[in-house]
Amino acid sequence: MEFDKELDARNLNCPLPILRCKKGLSEIQATQTLKVLATDPGSVKDFQAFCKQTGHELLQLDEADGLFTFYIKKRVA
């Protein structure tokens, strides 16, 4: 999947992946896509809840060997 910015949140535990994601989203334009890499299993529910609450769109979630990859489309303000 195509993305505009990549953010590495591997080896970070809650709430750091979400906080890094917020910062990453603030650095891209509306409708652009942020790719987030995380290893915290709890981040799956965290990112789903974060997107639901903020209006950003979780386009895709992949998991392979304990690495979670999230593709988040920034909402239009």
Image: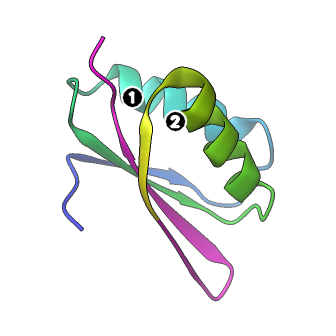
Lateral position of residue 71 relative to residue 47, left or right = left
Q: Please state which amino acid type lies under the numbered disc 1.
A: Leu
Residue under numbered circle 1: 25
Q: Residue 30's x, y, as percent? A: 22, 24
Residue at point 27% right, 19% down?
A: 76
As drawn, the label of residue 35 is none
The quadrant in which residue 3 appears is bottom left
Residue under numbered circle 2: 21
Lateral position of residue 3 relative to residue 51, left or right = left
Q: Are marks 2 and 1 in contact (CB under 8 Å)?
A: yes
Render colour scheme: rainbow
Lateral position of residue 27 relative to residue 14, left or right = left
Characterize the magenta stretch by its predominant secondary structure: strand
Where's the N terminus, which quadrant? Answer: bottom left
Where's the C terminus, which quadrant? Answer: top left
Mark 1 packing: few (<14 Cα in 10 Å), some, or many (20+)? Answer: many
Q: Nearer the viewer, residue 45 or 15?
A: 45
Mark 2 packing: few (<14 Cα in 10 Å), some, or many (20+)? Answer: many
Q: Please state which amino acid type lies under the numbered disc 2.
A: Cys
Residue 33 to residue 77: above or below: below
Element class at badge 1: helix
Which residues lie in the magenta part? 61-77
Q: Residue 21's x, y, as percent? A: 52, 36
Residue at point 47% right, 26% down?
A: 55
Residue 11 to residue 76: above or below: below
